[in-house]
Image (spheres, coloured by chain):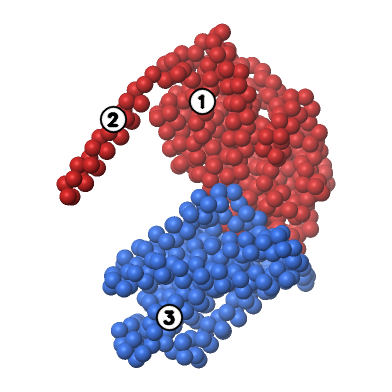
Amino acid sequence: MDILIQNLLNALQWGSFYALIALGYTLVYGVLLLINFAHGDIFMVGAYIAFFVATFFLGIVDFSPWVTLALTVPLTMLLTAAVGVTLERIAYRPLRRKGAHRLYVVITALMCGLILENGNLALLGASRKKFPELLDKVVYTYGNISVTNLKIIVIFAAIAVFFLLEFIVTRTKIGMAMRGISYDKFAIPLMGIPIDSVIVFTFVLGSAMAGLAGLLFAMSYPILEPYMGALIGWKAFIAAVVGGIGDIRGAFLGGFLLGFIEVGVVAVFPSTYRDLFAFSILLMILWIKPTGIFGVAKTTKI
Amino acid sequence: MSKMILRTVLVVMVMSLAFIILTGCSKEEEKIKIGFNIPLTGDIPKVGEASRNAAEMLKEEINSQGGLEVGGKKIPLEFYYEDNESKAESAVNSALKLIEQNGVVAIIGPNSSKQAVPAGGTCNDNRTPMVSPWSTNPDTTKNRPWVFRAAFLDPFQGPVAVNFASKQFKATTAAVLFDISNDYSKGLAEIFKDVWEKKNGAGTVVAFESHGTKDQDFSAQLTKIINSKPNFIFIPDNYNQVALIVKQAHDLGWTGPFMGSDAWGSSELMTLCGKDCVGQYFSTHYAAAGAKGATKEFIDRYNDKFGETPDDVAALTWDATRLVLQAIQDAGSYSTDVKVERKAIRDAISNIKEFAGITGSMKFDEQGDPIKCAVVVRIDENGQFVFAESVCP
């Protein structure tokens, strides 16, 4: 019983990262029908931005860890959002203006991801970075169950982000515009809605979430390397597809589902079986429902 | 107009081609070419950096005297550093590039067994002597007359860890967490389990868990391990993973000791792991703190030059490279024919019966493996690796 609860907590933490990244995939896909394969690397950039912001405030300005954390969260989200928007500006928007097929935009996204990874490798070198400790880690132990304050923060952050996005998309005007673009990209400008601004806003939202995920990830697993975003980004994308890409609830659920399956498999079987089992289960879900859990066969999403 | 541009481009191309061919043909000064097959990027970049630093230091020392004296003639050294990205397949490609393109007479590296086992096969097939500084897996040199090493073997290191842990922690049960896709980690974990269970009875390794190389979350494995209540956890893993594993174990409420292996011994371990690793023990090739003689001299010079204490990889690379240079000198003359020289170096290394390295003196057995002592170090409060015990075969 103790093992079960402990593993549930482990899975919630691990799933939170998938969920946070999957939300970014789903937002961009929902609006643009574009799979932004660079998103996993934006997550990596987010972690590095958090590292530089945190070391700047801790080392050069000499703030206390708490103040640093309070400043790092918004700054990381802001700067990562700027990176996402820059990508949109220089890579995706020109292609969209020229009316390029979606396939070419996806390939561009893949290239952007590789540029971010290798650019980082060339600029900062292969040596790993150690993320400074911003939180006084407290381990709460109940019987055989141990949980850190950081773990709780990560899980709550993922849930809070989900509700925030759900609120923005379903209850606000700009959310309505996002859903409108998803429904019909060509009719929406005729209504006087600035399509480019809405798309930029989508990228801001998605990348800010990736930045937050990067920061929380760096705090939980404090060793940074240029390729850290690649694998987790791919898996989060698969999680988003299984949940029904384009649907926020789907991304959230898919992320946690993948986290639960991965931790669950390792808890029972040797770790070699993890990806094999996890993806076999996901494949079976897609067999039964090819559009994903929350997916509908091509209507308005998000 | 466009024809003009085309012609210009053509002319430039022909000229540059001619330039390359002409310079390629010019008579080169005679040099001893040695290749280094090391991980400068990938999972363990610090290991490659330490190797390169040690090699550069050695090259500067010898070239500043005009070169290596072979049979009364001084020949300068030339080193080629090839990045194997910490990957098995890239290590094979790097070895082939060094052998075929650069025409090296011997190869130092790869460091980790994950790369050294496949690259050793390539070097052996291509009849090029290879000396791995850091690889401890028996398969690296097994039935490969062209492959040697400067480190002790896992069948020796495993029992060292077992005996030390049972004595130090008064342990009767152990848990193991290892990287299943790494030859080194997997091999050592299995040896450890065998030896431990022979000593303490079957089932005393209460948890034997694995993970993948790219994994960052070990909470499921650690939950299982902690729940099986071992006396200590044995982690034969690379330093970058150790930093994550030790931290996460503490997060999950583990307060007991860890025992590590020689892959912990990078100078970057403490930067990444911090206070979580303080007080832990691991077996390694030498202890920098409190060294004497030639070892001390090497440590001081390295420290002056690169601003950090050399780790075991740096020291072993120094020894491995000196072993090859010793063999070239022993052969008596340096042949301009690469194939002849490679053969001469191989024969000379296999004839070296005893070699005084800075990581201890080594004797070689018929497999090309040194018989040498291991030390166990403790990580103290300042992050220094302090000598705890020395074990000789």
Tag 3 and tag 1, C-beta contact below 8 Å: no
Chain-order first, disc 2 or disc 1? 2
Across and down, in percent, residue A86 comes to 45, 68
> Which label sits on residue B78?
1
**What distance separates the C-alpha of mark 3 from that of mark 1?**
58 Å
Does residue A190 appear to the left or right of B307 in the view shown? left
Residue B187 visible (yes or no): no
Q: Colour of chain A?
A: blue
Does residue A243 appear to the left or right of B244 in the view shown? left
Tag 2 and tag 3, C-beta contact below 8 Å: no
Q: Residues within 10 Å of mark 2 (few under 14, many from 20)?
A: few
Q: Which residue is mark 2?
A: B18
> Which label sits on residue B224?
none
Q: Residue at x 30, y 84 (%)?
A: A186
Does residue B7 appear to the left or right of B17 in the view shown? left
Q: Colour of chain B?
A: red
Q: Residues within 10 Å of mark 3 (few under 14, many from 20)?
A: few
- Amino acid beneath label 2: Ala
Q: Which residue is mark 3?
A: A197
Question: Is residue A10 positioned above or below B81 on the image?
Answer: below
Element marked by disc 3: helix
Across and down, in percent, residue A121 comes to 52, 51
Q: Chain of mark 2?
A: B
On the same chain, marks 3 and 1? The answer is no
- Amino acid beneath label 1: Glu
On the same chain, marks 2 and 3? The answer is no
Q: Residues within 10 Å of mark 1 (few under 14, many from 20)?
A: some
